[in-house]
Amino acid sequence: MDPKYPRVELNDGHFMPVLGFGTYAPPEVPRNRAMEVVKLAIEAGFRHIDSAHLYNNEEQVGLAIRSKIADGSVKREDIFYTSKLWCTFLRPELVQSALESSLKKLQLDYVDLYLIHFPVALKPGEDLMPKDENGKVIFDTVDLCAAWEAMEKCKEAGLAKSIGVSNFNRRQLEMILNKPGLKYKPVCNQVECHPYLNQSKLLDFCKSKDIVLVAHSALGTQRHEIWVDQNSPVLLEDPVLCALAKKHKRSPALIALRYQLQRGVVVLAKSYNEQRIRENVQATL
């Protein structure tokens, strides 16, 4: 990997670029936009690309990565690609085939990082969010430690260079770390993290266990009406953030990203706007 891109060493000896590009977009954004923005992100200097089965864009993201490899902009080993195991595939016998399905869509031989997306199992099947006749989500009962053993097998098979978790709390992390016969610790825990939810206790715990904290929603929580009170403050309009931005002649977004990097958090910057993509990559400068 190119040394000019700052990286952090993971507990399995691999390296992760400290600034990543998040590819999630709401369903109303045309899927082919993912291919365009990932190409733009790579051209701008991003080398860490984050996606997931849930995002329904891995075909387009894979096309973008392969096209930048084909035109000589990057080599495969320059790109750090993350995918995630969705909740309907948490049964141990489904884990490897779920990863193989992502690899087929991506047309890649391996992912650099494979994460358990949430510590929650849903009923296996085609539906991402299976519901009963009353509209209630149908859960499944899966031992997270058994799912982790299946993740370890994916690493041993060379399908994922590193394995980790996402949206886990301390207790759930400890369940994996204390598992008898543990072969590989999670290299990271990807969680929502920004100045309004700074995860300081979880960060301290992860650092004590040599687990990297990766921040998603680093520019503020998704402001979807089903999750968030629309009257709650908007992070990028925060007066302290805006005052710091003015002082340092940077955007509030860059201040929010830099905040994470300076506290040892790997940070994902998500934008489908070309100007902001080029701006966000400056966070490591």
Image: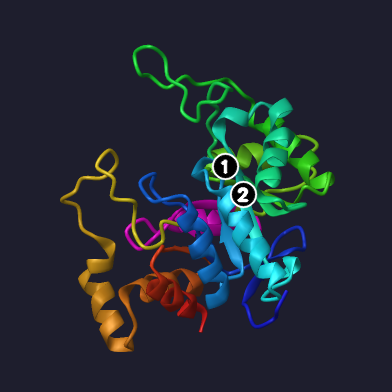
Which residue type carries mark 1?
A: His
Residue lying at the far top of the rendered structure: 133
Under circle 2, the secondary element is strand
Direction from residue 285 to residue 179 in the image, left or right = right
Direction from residue 227 to residue 152 in the image, left or right = right
Q: How many labels does the image show?
A: 2
> Magenta includes 210?
yes
Q: Is residue 260 above or below residue 27?
A: below
Residue depicted at 64% across the width and 26% down the height? 143
Q: In this view, does 30 lie above or below 132?
A: below
**Colour scheme:** rainbow
Residue 163: numbered disc: none
Q: In which quarter of the image is residue 18?
A: bottom right
Residue 53: numbered disc: 1
Find the magenta span and give its range.
189-215
Residue 83: numbered disc: 2
Direction from residue 223 to residue 32 in the image, left or right = right
Residue depicted at 84% across the width and 44% down the height? 157
